[in-house]
Image: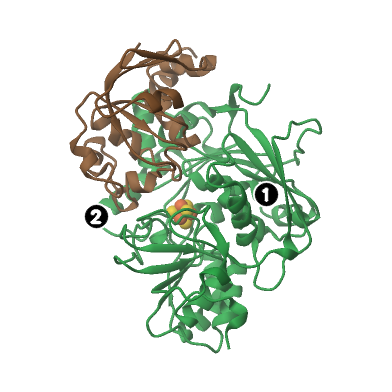
Chain colours: A green, B brown
Amino acid sequence: MRPGDVVTVRCDVVMANDVSGPVAFRAMEKMGATAVFDPSRVVMVADHFVPAKDAKSAELQARLKDWSRAHGVAFYGQGRGGIEHTLLCEEGWIVPGAVVAGGDSHTCTYGALGAFGTGLGSTDIASCLALGRFWQRVPETIVVELTGSLGPFVAGKDVILAVLGRIGVGGGTNAVLEFAGPGAEALTIDERLAVANMAVEAGSETGLFAADATTEEYVRDRARFPWAADRTDEDAEVRERLAIDLAALEPLVALPHLPGNVAPVSEAAGVRVDQVYIGNCANGTLTDLRQAASILRGRQVHPDTRAIVVPATQAIWRAAAAEGLLDVFAEAGAMVSTPTCGACFGGSNGALAPGENAVTTTNRNFRGRMGSPEASVYLANAWVAAAAAVAGELVHPRTLG
Amino acid sequence: MTVEGIALVVPGDNVDTDVMYPGAFLNIEDPEAMAPHLFEGFDPSLRERLTGETILVVGENFGIGSSREHVPIAMKANGVRGVVGRSFARIFFRNCMNLGLAAVACPDAVDAARDGSAIAIDPSGVVVVDGRRFPVPAAPALLTELAEAGGLVAWTERELESR
Ligand code: SF4
């Protein structure tokens, strides 16, 4: 088996959501498939239009739930789940070495736990549900060697933005990004999730961290399946090597309208900010909420700026409440939302008007992604986003008074 | 089966699936109802130029971003027969293969094509633009099998029947 060969791959877990699921169910019916390959390995999550923004969205969620019940598979609905990728890690569906087929491009997030998670369209998912396998071009490998440790106000988000700044939005096509070195081992699971999540923004199949003691500790009490850590073959061909010194990174932003338009935040300082959005499958973790709260505690959101905080899952929401973080946000004048994909993809809950600028911890700033095609989105870490909320403009967090 | 049609150039590189089918319309699951939203965030006037026998001619890294199959589904529902590009983003390319929508990477053919060019995509490994022939590398066996079946729905149906 060599890079470029097309093979079929067995799936350990198949996942879809309220957008990709119903389209997949139609395709599955056309295939003549009446049962899923293994109900214990299928999971459906309503997260994109949750809570339903209109009758059509409600119908999709009802269909997702009814289908899940009929096929005896796991279903997470509102109030019990959250954003699929954060949720599936939290709930132990993802174990090192697993192959995860997800009806969502950010399925690459699971690489943070040493799993081959990869995003597929709905017809692919239909075939996975029926057969438990999918076709896959054997990817090449790009090794990203990380050294040093993250400095103040620098997060996992900046690591992946630095990669995107170097290789661009097509630089990872037909390859897996593999994060290695002492700097990778030093990253927490939440930071690894942020990094792996945006591998697809480089065009990559997934972003992989080899499972280590940190992974083992995270997975130990949650794993739903037995697992053994896979290591990359020693003789695997490497297409490209990048080296990043974490200690030399500064907070970065992706400028409109491409995740690869990366610049230091200081170069974008002064841009007026109408909305700040802290949330999404990449950066709605407890780590992000703590970072944001450390900025917002004792400060106020700028009177001309709206701030929305979206904990990624119900469990994170509750942990943030227990720590008093949600109250910090509310007191600062931010709106705290229930877990949802919401405005991340322009679904609901915070769309942008023409001419508006937003700073978000999400993963895509394509034109029109969050509402009006005439709005602009800057991607950044949670410290930078929270600091922008306070200042009403893009600033380096260290410059806040 | 050779796919023939008339070129419509979609300008630019890295055209993402959000602009081709904005997120606000993802609560639609019926292909006919998806069709009117194609290119909504990019250039809605392109829609009016789809003739029912259109082959899209696109740039580098076409179809980046979301895995939403709504994009190639809406293309098919609008009568798009195939896509010839400089290169494709992974999931978009998969979705085209799976839906039986011919997608071929052939930069020379893209250079040669203009709006209105006659294009033929011959699965044996040639793209023809206004009579000029441009070879493309042969597809891997599994993808040829998929294309011959007409897409992943029929392919999976056959797999299930052969059990
Ligand atoms: S939070 Fe955003 S990027 Fe993540 S799965 Fe939801 S819509 Fe996609």
Q: Quadrant of residue A322?
A: bottom right
Residue A85 visible within the image: yes
User: Where does label 1 land, which residue?
Assistant: A113
Left or right, residue B96 beside residue A165: left
Give the chain letter at badge 1. A
Q: Residue at x 73, y 64 (%)?
A: A248
Q: Residue at x 61, y 74 (%)?
A: A290
- Is label 1 in a helix, a strand or a loop? helix
Q: Nearer the viewer, residue A105 or B137?
A: B137
The percent position of residue A173, horizontal first and vertical second, equals 56, 37
Q: Amino acid at mark 1?
A: Leu
Three-letter code, disc 2: Ala
Q: Residues within 10 Å of mark 1 (few under 14, many from 20)?
A: many
x and y percentages locating residue A334 in the rendered image: 44, 79
- Report the Cα–Cα distance between label 2 and label 1: 37 Å
**Kind of element beneath mark 2:** helix
Relative to residue B44, is residue A4 drawn left or right? right
Q: Which mark is on residue A55?
A: 2
* Image: A318 above or below A89: below
Q: Is residue A324 visible?
A: no
Answer above or below: position of A234 versus A247. above
Q: Chain of mark 2?
A: A
